[in-house]
Image: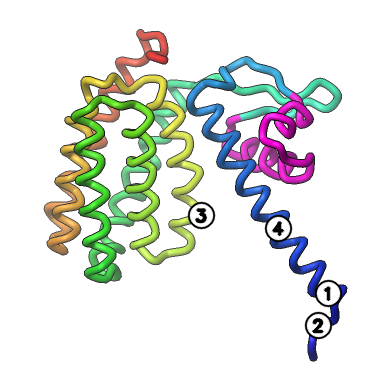
Amino acid sequence: MTAGPDARAIATDAGRTRSLAETAYDAIEQMIISRRLAPGAMVSEGELGAELALGRTPVREALARLKTIGFVEVHPRRGVLVTPVDVIRHLELLEVRRPLDETMARCIIVRASDNDLDALQRHTEGLLVAAGARDREVYFRLKRTLHEAMVGAAYNQTLTSTMGPLHAQSRRFWYSHEPTASFQDCAGIHATIVAGIAARNAERALAGIATLFDLLDQMTRRALDRRPLV
């Protein structure tokens, strides 16, 4: 059966709406992570739509997703509240992420192609350069790219859907709390992990993950007594 013009138009409109919703999600997420929308800020769908030159539907869909990961609270007739960053909750997140990162590494080692592994190493090289320059915007953008490439190279849809929100929450926390002086240490540990994965050496990769999460735990605990850096 061939879809008629109306069905094709509906499918096209649905695809376009999803694309606009993704655009809205990425933009609003970054506004919250970079604190352009600071914790405690109250905004409306209309204000965000005007800022992004998007309609209410994609903005509403984006906000619904952001609500599920704890970035915003939606208050009918009042607006959308940007939630605070919770240090204790981030410690809990690290407990969950550690075994998932270990699982991800094992999956990559078993399933990734040589091209996948080459791409991971290139992303790591870029991250090391950004860390040396202490460029916060570029550093976090490239770290996101590396994390997404690693999740993709694991070829596990459940892992992909689980890790995406956790990585977003981590990015939000670290953007405000990771000092630029730690960039090179963190990037170097990421490079060690990727080198172990690229060698398909699980023991080496898992040792790097243990080192990384021990450091992240220490840095998170120090944030209990510090104000956000940005």
| Mark identifier at residue 7 | 1
The reply to whether discs 2 and 1 touch (Cβ–Cβ < 8 Å) is yes
Out of 192 and 183, give the one closest to the viewer.
183
Q: How is the image coloured?
A: rainbow
* Residue topped by disc 3: 161
Residue lying at the far bottom of the rendered structure: 1
| Quadrant location, the C terminus | top left
Tell me if residue 121 comes above or below residue 167 in the rendering: below
Q: Which residue is mark 4?
A: 16
Distance (Cα) linking label 4 and label 2: 18 Å
Percent position of residue 51, x then y: 68, 29
State which mark lies toward you, 3 or 2: 2
Q: Amino acid at mark 4?
A: Arg
Q: Is residue 198 above or below residue 83?
A: below
Give percent across and percent down for residue 26.
56, 41
Residue 133 x/y as whole percent: 22, 27
The segment highlighted magenta reads 44-71
The amino acid at mark 1 is Ala
Q: Is residue 168 magenta?
A: no
Rounded to the nearest whole Å, what is the CA distance between mark 4 and mark 3?
22 Å
